[in-house]
Image (spheres, helix red, strand yellow):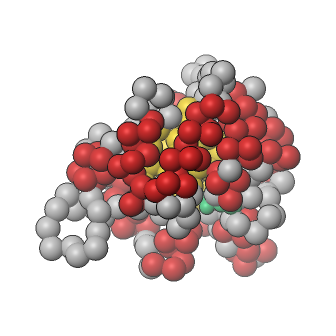
Amino acid sequence: MSDVTRTPVVAGNWKLNQTIDESLTLVRQLREAISGVDGVEVIVGPVATALHAVAGELKGSNIGLAAQNTHHEASGAFTGELSPLLLADVGCTHCIVGHSERRQLFGETDAGVGRKAAALQAHGLVPIVCLGETLEQREAGETLGVCLGQLDASLDGVAVAGDRLIVAYEPVWAIGTGKTAKASDAQEVHAALRARLREAHGEVADSIRILYGGSVKPANAAELLAEVDIDGALVGGASLKAETFAPIVEAAAG
Ligand code: PEP
């Protein structure tokens, strides 16, 4: 074990919510609410149509800007898609890939997630690679096998370094359901993920931030974030209001 300290990350996934005006209002409120908070990296993830406006609103702050998806190619005949090149152009610093909603509703595979993550890195963006088990898999005792399998397969060809990659463990049954993993259960998965990263990539594993996601809210954030391998949170519902997102950021700052 090295003694690398990992700056916590709190990222908001706004999903398919918020017009441009609503996004700008939320960012302004958030900037005000967390203006005195240090020691935590904050990222917001608006819908694609709001990225440009939000990038402008974030100028002069150190809040990161995440897209929620990308294609792996930079350009070409891919009607309706966005690319890492264009996301960098609009001011994104990060991009969520492999969210369970994309895996379940849009057929995203581990191999596809890996291609997207590598392409994002090639354009200077940091992928937030999501993985997690379904309820059936948890009940069948398959959680660690599923998560480690997704980690291996989703990181094929991806650079593993603390400033180039963020991993998010999001049990599918906890996303948007109000059910949260017990902190100790989440820690068990995070520790296993880090151990696997260490096995495959060495000590750099200690610099990778592994976020927990799944119904994180002000009431449960501190307990989850107190776990040694939980380095922050990927937040859906509670990221849509500054009054619920800011306390999570504060909890991560410690
Ligand atoms: C998410 O969408 O990544 C998420 C964790 O959602 P929620 O916080 O609403 O469960």
The picture quadrant where one finds residue 126 is top left
Residue 216 horizontal/vertical position (percent): 74, 52
Foreground: 120 or 191?
A: 120
- Name the outermost residue toward the left: 76
- The quarter of the picture showing ligand 1: bottom right
Q: How many marks?
A: 0
The picture quadrant where one finds residue 143 is bottom right
Foreground: 217 or 175?
A: 217
Residue at image x 23%, y 75%? 79
Residue at image x 47%, y 28%? 61
* Residue 225 in the figure: left or right of residue 235: right
Does 2 sit above or below residue 31? above
Residue at image x 50%, y 61%? 19
* Image quarter hosting the N terminus: top right
Foreground: 201 or 24?
A: 24
Residue at image x 25%, y 53%? 86
Residue 159 horizontal/vertical position (percent): 35, 43
Residue 210 horizontal/vertical position (percent): 59, 43
Q: Is residue 93 visible?
A: no
Foreground: 126 or 218?
A: 218
Q: Is residue 139 visible?
A: yes
Does 129 sit above or below residue 233? below
* Residue 158 in the figure: left or right of residue 153: left
* Image quarter hosting the C terminus: top right
Residue 194 horizontal/vertical position (percent): 59, 42
